[in-house]
Amino acid sequence: MGWKTLDDMDLQGKTVLTRVDINVPMEDGAVTDDTRIRRLIPTMTDLMAGGARPVLLAHFGRPKGKVVPEMSLQPLVPALEAAFGAPVVFVADCRGPAAEAAVAALQPGQILLLENTRFHPGEEANDAELAAGMARLGDLYCNDAFSAAHRAHASTEALARLLPACAGRLMEAELKALEAALANPKRPVTAVVGGAKVSSKLDLLGNLVAKVDTLVIGGGMANTFLAAQGIDVGKSLCEHDMTDTARAIMERAAAAGCTILLPTDIVVAREFKAGAASETLAADACPPDAMILDAGPATVDAIARAFASTRTLIWNGPLGAFEIAPFDIATNEAARKAAEFTAAGQLISVAGGGDTVAALNQAGAADSFSYISTAGGAFLEWMEGKDLPGVAALSQ
Ligand code: ADP
Ligand code: MG
């Protein structure tokens, strides 16, 4: 663990620089999805209840170190006020005299929002001087932006080393869920890795085979593993130049005592479109003019049996082309099984990844999972076993 939470900090009368992720979708100057903002409510509530004055630091878009008016955080003020139930004061810089004056004038019960940190080139350069300029504004630092923790930026890394630092509630929940999944999991641990390509998830597969008891490989990347065993996958999505890599991963798994589950039956079609005529065949029977678009029922049964004896489940990547029916069936059924076992208290389930979250929502399974990470890149880097600079800086 090694990092502090808000419970470890004396907040009374303190100005708390709070790094948040409010990089929300906007249209015509209004927030269209405030999920990321609402997830900050526990931290904002606890800061204010503890007598602290929150000062928010955040990025928005990719202004590349220049002031880009369209990427100002000012239009977010009404959405923040609505979510947090408190007045939000905005100041057009994240350091310097105007920001210092705004902090000095901030009243208890108010929240200060500083302008987009990425308007300064020092943000992405993790510049010590920019971090020092921000540190002058507060007494404490609270990082609640797990989704930005895989980047060593001034507001996520250097600043954390200049002030007493802790994790916010969202960061805390995310780290606890991820530590429960991979650092100290209840065994047996099963990981499901699916999605389009082996090449985009090499580090993930490499880390997981050394740590989990069973690895379910599905989706397009399973085709590459089938091809690596000499199976003809027809016109399927397949990285033929990655078959050596796939074989190496299977050898590492065998050496580590990790069982790999590949599809034993497949659903194939001639067209990649909704409602395309499909048939279910053995995994080694894909016709030369067909594509594998989903796993078949025997594979789903085998996955369900593996889940039945699993205590911890990690999931990234759908088992098939879940966006187009009927190739969403394996993903939906396996997801519902995982949800059912989680609801019964048999296992802890942690999932992440853009398409994975969409697929679990579509299956109606997301609400029953123990934890769904919306952190994208940071979630994957954690699962790849990498140190996240924003977390490491809290753990000093
Ligand atoms: P995530 O965003 O959760 O990390 P990925 O982006 O790796 O997941 O993978 C999701 C994509 O993989 C989806 O667009 C899905 O259609 C695609 N996919 C899964 N199985 C297949 C398959 N058999 N053939 C082609 N595409 C597939
Ligand atoms: Mg994706």
Image (cartoon, grey):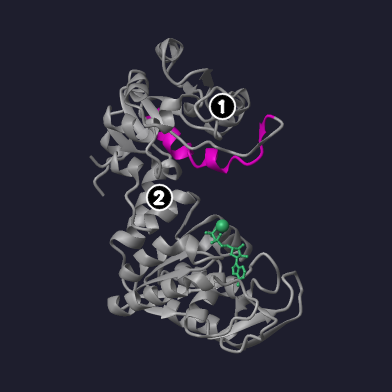
At horizontal 50% and vertical 70% (from top left) the residue drawn is: 241
The magenta segment: 29-49
Q: Which residue is more in the foreground, 364 or 282?
A: 282
First reached walking from the N terminus: tag 1 or tag 2: 1
Q: In this view, does 51 lie to the left or right of 275?
A: left
At mark 1, the secondary structure is loop
Residue designated by label 2:
174
Residues 235 and 117: in front is 235
Residue type marked 1: Leu
Which mark, by number, is residue 73? 1
Alpha carbon distance from label 1 to label 2: 25 Å
Residue 277: where, in percent of width, then height?
A: 76, 80
Q: At x 54% / y 70%, what residue is drawn?
A: 239
Which sits in the foreground, 170 or 145?
A: 145
Q: Can residue 6 be spotted in the picture?
A: no
Predominant secondary structure, magenta span: helix
Q: Quadrant of residue 4?
A: top left
Q: What element carries label 2?
A: helix
